[in-house]
Amino acid sequence: MKHSTNSLRSITRLLLCTAVTFLFSASAFAHTALTEATPGDGAIVKEGPAHISLVFNGPVKLVKLELMGVGHEMPTNFESNSEAKAAFMFETPGMHPGKFTVNWAVIGEDGHTVTNSYSFTVDPNATDEQLRAHPAEAGHGAGGDH
């Protein structure tokens, strides 16, 4: 009977250690991700947006935001600061027709820097079908690169 009790305790300890190890490893790989962007990745809009908004899966420090047109950077009211938050909105004055790329970088709560980008198009001649196929507001699940 004593052997059976010791075996049960050993198995319980092993399962507990395995569970704790799994939890720590899972949290180590849970990095910051962009969950929503407006305009969204691949969106087609008829008018240049007055704002760009980014929503992340947790509080982050946004350290870089570039709005790139073809061959040039577009102005925004982005200013890097040390306040961590999950949602950001930036004015985008002077938007014109064309393809745009949003390049961003954040520092997550885990201290890792994550960078990524996405694109959208301003096309005043876009058809209703194109607009439905590429909505302006869309989730963006890409986590980013380290």
Image: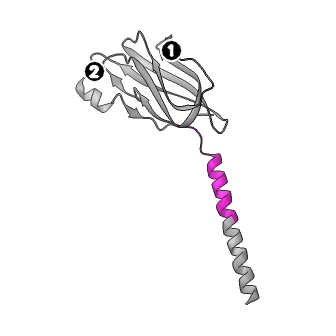
Residue 132 vertical position relative to residue 81 in the rendered view, above or below: below
Q: Quadrant of the N terminus?
A: bottom right
Is 37 on the left-hand or right-hand side of 144?
Answer: left
Residue at the bottom extreme?
Answer: 1
Label 2 or label 1, whichever lies nearer to me, is 1
Looking at the image, which is closer to me, 78 or 139? Answer: 78
Disc 2 from disc 1: Cα separation: 27 Å
Pick whichever of labels 2 and 1 is earlier in the sequence: 1
Task: Identify the secondary structure beneath mark 1.
Answer: loop
Is 58 on the left-hand or right-hand side of 22?
Answer: left
Residue 36 vertical position relative to residue 93 in the rendered view, above or below: below
Instruction: Give me the residue at 62% from left, 46% from top.
Output: 29
Q: Position of residue 124 (x, y in %)?
A: 29, 15
Three-letter code for the amino acid on which mark 1 is drawn: Asn
* Region in magenta: 17-33
Residue 121: quarter of image: top left
Is 48 on the left-hand or right-hand side of 62?
Answer: left
For label 1, the crowd category at 10 Å Cα-Cα, with few meaning under 14, some 14 to 19 and many 20 or more, is few
Instruction: Give me the residue at 62% from left, 51% from top.
Output: 26
Residue tagged 1: 77
Residue tagged 2: 126
For label 2, the crowd category at 10 Å Cα-Cα, with few meaning under 14, some 14 to 19 and many 20 or more, is some
Residue 136: give its label: none
Q: Position of residue 12 (x, y in %)?
A: 68, 73
Is 71 on the left-hand or right-hand side of 5?
Answer: left
Q: Position of residue 93 (x, y in %)?
A: 42, 11
Instruction: Give me the residue at 63% from left, 55% from top.
Output: 23
- Asked if the magenta segment contains residue 117, the reply would be no
The secondary structure making up most of the magenta span is: helix
Three-letter code for the amino acid on which mark 2 is drawn: Ala
Q: Position of residue 4 (x, y in %)?
A: 71, 85
Colour scheme shown: one colour
